[in-house]
């Protein structure tokens, strides 16, 4: 009957707004909402005018430095984050397609004989690190979805059971594939339509999976280093046959001809294919031939391609100074740009970021 | 409304303040349903000399030739079973006179524990908690098999494995030998199955860590250029600046430390040995390690197709022996010593707990009037009886420990030492688990090696103040 109730209502409205806002932020921070990082983040660590940045790792016995090297891999190393791990177990990972995040698999618990890994999300813009999932095998590289909103990883919930799960940036999980009695399932990449391709290793050999569906048998033996072409139509990989690593390129759909398949049927050993985003061609590390190799062998040794810059203008490689796959020599990460090579002080490359 | 919003805000802040992950307490299966045992142990002052000798004797089966009875009458078996030998189809039964190559055991112990029997908080030459992994691997050999706590009370064998380095090493060797003897029925045979050949132990070493796909040398997640073995932190080793421990399979770690021995205080822990790793560039070796063959063996125990040669005459590849000379068996007795345990303390006690959770306590002293390491077990008849050291953290309940003879200087910290080590035990009541009113329980302290007699302490526990005006009557006592 007087102004007091009205006054109380006004105060309550402000309180509601403030309280709700605080609640949303607090709960977002507590439970790792993906939008929170975006709302609070800015490329403070990595100025956009100094990119693209090569994202790599400087190892330590018990912690790794994640660094960004600007100017196309020729600038100074900027420390983005430090990731502690079990002694002797360096992080593995991949940069998201939008260049914003590093998804890292890091052995953080268990023992050296029985390690257990976490999936960590490193925001390359501000160095923030969040744990998305624990209890994972440490021997794996996460695979990003094309929209950079989730990653695919594997886990082994029971002895002999392998699962591929999609983990959202907020930590939500979706089971994509599950198999028993197999050696492993290895996520390879997401096609442009969002379908995950994986390779299943079991007693039959290596089988390409589209989602949970078996698409084609790749070989009757072990394979490795699988990579999907940017258009999602071809798969490059390495087959282990008769003690040799042989490069292969096949269409993901059986019965379709692969344009580059013949180029790698020469019996020479190959490893670690990557796709050139500018030309659509695939590049392998090749064992030097007597008359010289096909790729960048002018300096001697062997180049293992790691990652092209997003615009294709530079390529990070591991350069080994040996003369054969049996004796590869000593490695060094280098960036090749315009025919010039520059050494980079990292031991692992996770990809490129161009804020 | 303001109160409601304020309450919501407080709730949100409270939720945010919670620890990031709050799990119910659980343990890996290897720890058992009752969780890990807590053991004390002695860490040798000269770890290199003492543990190398003990490993040598354990690998040669010189410590125990038969099961023995503890002073309390329990039979335990740490005897060396001997190794089978010969190829598939011509395998000879286990021969206790044939040793495990000692350098293999040294390297496994290094890879497992860095030659530590005790946790990192215990000084060399000191007594303290045993090294224990999250999955209940104990001590030098990180013995996991048989260490599960399934009843709440450890067996004498579990205590001995967790408290005394000789028993721990003897058990580690028994486990490794069991992996070797699993061939040819359940595991492949490397080479001709010759236990004197370092190369022929490849599958037994692999199995010590689990015959897992992650340890398969051709696992596609492993770098083919990592080098054939781990550099063991030797700057001269292959891949030293590039690859770490985690980049190698378990056999590559063990063989790597055999070739590039680790150093402590600038001294190599052992002499390097020569051997050849599997030649995967040879089609017959590569095909033996195929996915199909590994799966058949790992899942269905059909392992013949994984057998591979360790002798390839055309390439000059042949197996190598361990050059370590045999140890003097008499030294085994010296490493076991002649402990004689005596427990000082009352035979009975009445302990009362208060509503604030505090408990009266009684103290026992376990003294070794003999020599060297005297292991003992602690047993209780009820879960509300706690036994620990006076300064132990809350939650530690001692299941076994050691007392050291006064002839041995035991390091307390830094340069401070004492003549021997008396294990002081504090017995009290966990009020949260204590029954209402009056309850009776018993604590036993039992010598497990050497001389001594089991000690018994009868406890009458009184839970006071639980009920208003509660009157407690203990037969024969007024209180």
Image (spheres, coloured by chain):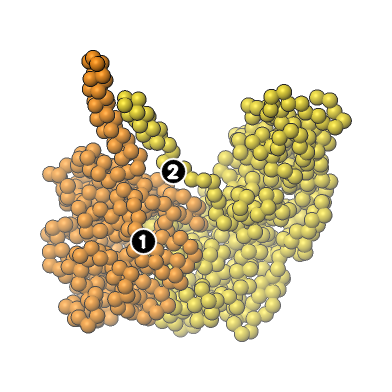
Chain colours: A orange, B yellow
Q: Residue B375's x, y, as percent?
A: 73, 47
Label 2 neighbour load within 10 Å: few <14, some 14-19, many 20+: few
Q: CA distance from mark 2 to mark 1?
A: 22 Å
Task: Kindly state the secondary structure of the residue where label 2 is placed.
Answer: loop
Task: Kindly state the secondary structure of the residue where label 1 is placed.
Answer: strand
Q: Is residue B86 left or right of residue B253?
A: right
State which mark lies toward you, 2 or 1. 1
Who is closer to the viewer here, B140 or B265?
B140
> Chain ID for label 1?
A
Instruction: Name the disc covering residue B8, or none.
Output: none
Q: Residue A149's x, y, as percent?
A: 25, 53
Q: Say which residue label 2 marks.
A: B21
- Quadrant of the image occupied by residue B457: top right
Q: Say which residue label 1 marks.
A: A175
> Chain ID for label 2?
B
Q: Residue A189's x, y, as percent?
A: 26, 64
Q: Residue B221's x, y, as percent?
A: 37, 64
Q: Residue at x 51, y 54 (%)?
A: B262
Q: Is residue B164 visible?
A: no
Who is closer to the viewer here, A56 or A232?
A232
Who is closer to the viewer here, B157 or B476?
B476
Hey, which residue is sitting farthest front in the picture? A1
Label 1 neighbour load within 10 Å: few <14, some 14-19, many 20+: few
Residue B457 in the image: above or below residue B451: above
Q: Residue at x 61, y 38 (%)?
A: B395
Q: Is residue B332 left or right of residue A346?
A: right
């Amino acid at each position: 009957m007087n102004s007091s109730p009205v006054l109380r209502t006004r105060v309550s409205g402000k309180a509601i707004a403030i309280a709700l806002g605080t609640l949303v932020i607090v709960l977002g921070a507590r439970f790792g909402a993906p939008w929170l990082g975006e709302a609070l983040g800015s490329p403070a660590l990595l100025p956009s005018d100094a990119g693209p940045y090569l994202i790599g790792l400087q190892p330590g016995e018990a912690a790794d430095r994640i660094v960004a090297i600007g100017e196309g891999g020729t600038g100074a190393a900027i420390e983005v984050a430090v990731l502690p791990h079990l002694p002797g177990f360096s992080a593995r990972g991949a940069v998201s397609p939008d260049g914003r995040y590093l998804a890292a698999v890091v052995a953080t618990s268990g023992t050296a004989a029985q390690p257990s890994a976490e999936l960590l999300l490193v925001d390359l813009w501000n160095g923030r690190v969040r744990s998305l999932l624990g209890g994972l095998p440490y021997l794996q590289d996460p695979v990003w979805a094309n929209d950079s909103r989730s990653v695919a990883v594997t886990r082994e919930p029971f002895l002999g059971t392998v699962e591929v799960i999609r983990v959202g940036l907020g930590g939500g999980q979706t089971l994509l594939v599950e198999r028993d009695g197999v050696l492993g399932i290895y996520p390879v990449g997401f096609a442009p339509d969002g379908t995950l391709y994986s390779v299943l290793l079991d007693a039959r050999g290596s089988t390409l999976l589209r989602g949970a569906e078996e698409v084609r048998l790749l070989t009757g033996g072990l394979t490795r280093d699988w990579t999907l072409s940017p258009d999602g139509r071809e798969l490059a990989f390495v087959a282990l046959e008769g003690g040799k690593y042989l490069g292969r390129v096949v269409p993901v759909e059986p019965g379709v001809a692969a344009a580059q398949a013949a180029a790698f049927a020469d019996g020479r050993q190959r490893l670690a294919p990557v796709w050139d985003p500018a030309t659509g061609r695939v590049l392998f590390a090749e064992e030097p031939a007597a008359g010289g190799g096909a790729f960048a062998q002018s300096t001697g040794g062997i180049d293992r391609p790691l990652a092209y810059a997003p615009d294709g203008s530079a390529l990070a490689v591991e350069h080994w100074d040996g003369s054969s796959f049996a004796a590869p020599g000593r490695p060094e990460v280098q960036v090749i740009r315009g025919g010039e090579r520059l050494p980079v002080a990292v031991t692992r490359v996770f990809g490129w970021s161009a804020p | 409304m303001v109160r409601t919003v304020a309450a919501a805000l407080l709730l949100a802040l409270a939720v945010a303040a919670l620890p990031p992950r709050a799990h119910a307490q659980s343990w890996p299966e290897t720890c058992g349903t009752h969780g890990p045992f807590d053991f004390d142990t002695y860490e040798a002052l000269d770890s290199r000399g003492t543990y190398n000798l003990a490993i040598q004797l354990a690998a040669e089966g010189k410590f125990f030739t038969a099961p023995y009875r503890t002073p309390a009458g329990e039979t335990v078996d740490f005897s060396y079973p001997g190794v089978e030998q010969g190829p598939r189809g011509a395998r000879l039964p286990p021969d206790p006179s044939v040793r495990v190559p000692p350098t293999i055991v040294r390297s496994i112990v290094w890879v497992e524990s860095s030659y530590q029997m005790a946790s990192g908080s215990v000084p060399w030459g000191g007594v303290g908690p045993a090294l224990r992994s999250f999955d209940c691997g104990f001590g030098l050999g990180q013995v996991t098999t048989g260490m599960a706590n399934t009843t709440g009370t450890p067996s004498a064998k579990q205590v001995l494995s967790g408290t005394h380095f000789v028993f721990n090493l003897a058990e580690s060797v028994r486990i490794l030998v069991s992996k070797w003897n699993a061939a040819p029925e359940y595991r492949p045979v490397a080479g001709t199955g010759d236990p004197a050949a370092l190369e022929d132990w490849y599958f037994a070493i692999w199995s010590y860590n689990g015959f897992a796909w992650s340890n398969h040398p051709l696992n596609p997640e492993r770098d083919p250029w990592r080098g054939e073995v781990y550099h063991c932190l030797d700057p001269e080793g292959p891949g030293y600046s590039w690859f770490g421990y985690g980049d190698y399979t378990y056999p590559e770690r063990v063989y790597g430390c055999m070739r590039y021995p680790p150093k402590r205080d600038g001294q190599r822990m052992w002499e390097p040995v020569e051997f050849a790793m599997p030649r995967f560039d040879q089609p017959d070796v590569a095909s033996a390690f195929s996915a199909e063959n590994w799966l058949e063996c790992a899942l269905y125990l059909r392992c013949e197709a994984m057998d591979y040669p360790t002798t390839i005459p055309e390439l000059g590849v042949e197996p190598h022996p361990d050059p370590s000379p045999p140890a003097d068996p008499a030294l085994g007795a010296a490493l076991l010593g002649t402990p004689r345990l005596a427990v000082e303390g009352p035979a009975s006690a009445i302990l009362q707990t208060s509503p604030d959770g505090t408990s009266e306590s009684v103290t026992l002293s376990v003294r070794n009037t003999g020599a060297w390491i005297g292991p003992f077990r602690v047993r209780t008849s009820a879960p509300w009886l706690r036994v620990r050291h006076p300064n132990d953290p809350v939650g530690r309940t001692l299941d076994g420990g050691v007392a050291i003879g006064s002839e041995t200087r035991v390091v307390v910290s830094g340069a401070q030492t004492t003549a021997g080590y008396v294990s002081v035990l504090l017995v009290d009541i966990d009020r949260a688990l204590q029954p209402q009113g009056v309850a009776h329980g018993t604590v036993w302290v039992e010598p497990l090696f050497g001389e001594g007699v089991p000690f018994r302490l009868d406890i009458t526990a009184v839970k006071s103040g639980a009920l208003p005006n509660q009157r407690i009557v203990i037969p024969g006592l007024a209180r």
